Amino acid sequence: MRSGFAVSFNQPNLSTVATWNRNGIIFANESILGVMRSDIVIDTKNLVYILSEEKKRIFVWHNNSINPTQNISANFGDLKSIFVTTNGDIYVSAHLTQGSTFIMRWISETNAFTLACKFSYQCDDIFIDIDDNIYCSMSSGNVVFKRNLKSPKNQIVVAGMNGPGSDSNQLIYPCGIFVDVNFDLFVADSGNNRIQLFLFGETNAITVAGRQSTRPTIELYMPTGITLDAKKYLFIVEEYYNRIVGEGPCGFRCLIGCYEGDTESRQRLYPYSMSFDSLGNIFHTDSRNNRIIKYQLTEISSGE
């Protein structure tokens, strides 16, 4: 694995027995966010970025502030996904009624938006790798596209080469995506109830979680979000199973919304995406209740 490359998001070095307080804290509610079913991003400075679909705004929290300290107008269409780069620039996917998606870049030095590139379908999630390639997962097209932001004219298919299906080169309703520093692509293949790993340059994936996986795994139901920690263990959000699961050396385990008999807690949650802060706390969007929930890490390790 490559090392020494700066990324804009947190990948905490968690203990293999890390646990989180099952009683989440409401970080932001509907009165601030309005109706929302979109991303949350936390950068390495612990700035929290949240899209509001209803209010057409990006809300930013600094240094654990109670209320947003920035409120950026983003009235471009149906806001869906957000990504923040190491220099503080913000990329937002805005789906238009004609069917295409504009990727708008908010430049931190000028506090203004500019068009970065376009995609032919709605981007359910976007991700930018360390070489300034932007990836767009398109659930309606069952593919993941990639463009280079330095020369964004050409888009190429990097996952889902053979139409919708369950083969290793196919996807159904892909949602969350993650690209590591080796340019390996992880896809939450929601319609196939699995997580697919496309090694760099490969069009046939390895199933690393869920249905058809050869690894110690867990049954998934429509995963929508995915991230990795410092040890490259997977953390998966299942919107329709109301939980978050995490990987370790012995396979997967439930982290949030998975306690026996805790059906009331699970019914209250509808997690869509998640992000870590630098301390390893988990923040996730709750799309049913239009809020952000924070779960504090209770078992801490400096590394094993």
Image (tube, grey):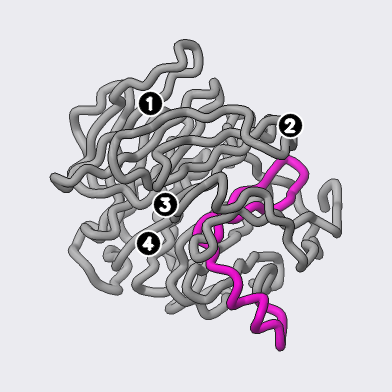
In space, the residues marked 1 and 4 are separated at their CA atoms by 31 Å
Numbered label attached to residue 105 = 1
Residue density around tag 3, few if under 14, some if 14–19, many if 20 or more, within 10 Å: some
* Res. 226 visible in picture: no
In space, the residues marked 4 and 3 are separated at their CA atoms by 7 Å
* Earlier residue among tags 1 and 2: 2
Report which quarter residue 49 is drawn in.
Answer: top right
- Secondary element under disc 4, as helix, strand or loop, is loop
Amino acid carrying label 3: it is: Leu
The residue range painted magenta reads: 258-286
* Earlier residue among tags 4 and 3: 3
Amino acid carrying label 4: it is: Ala
Give the foreground label among 2 and 4.
2
Numbered label attached to residue 205 = 4
Numbered label attached to residue 199 = 3
Q: Residue 280 colored magenta?
A: yes
Report which quarter residue 235 is drawn in.
Answer: bottom right
Give the foreground label among 1 and 2.
2
* Earlier residue among tags 1 and 3: 1
Left or right relative to 159: residue 188: right
Numbered label attached to residue 63 = 2
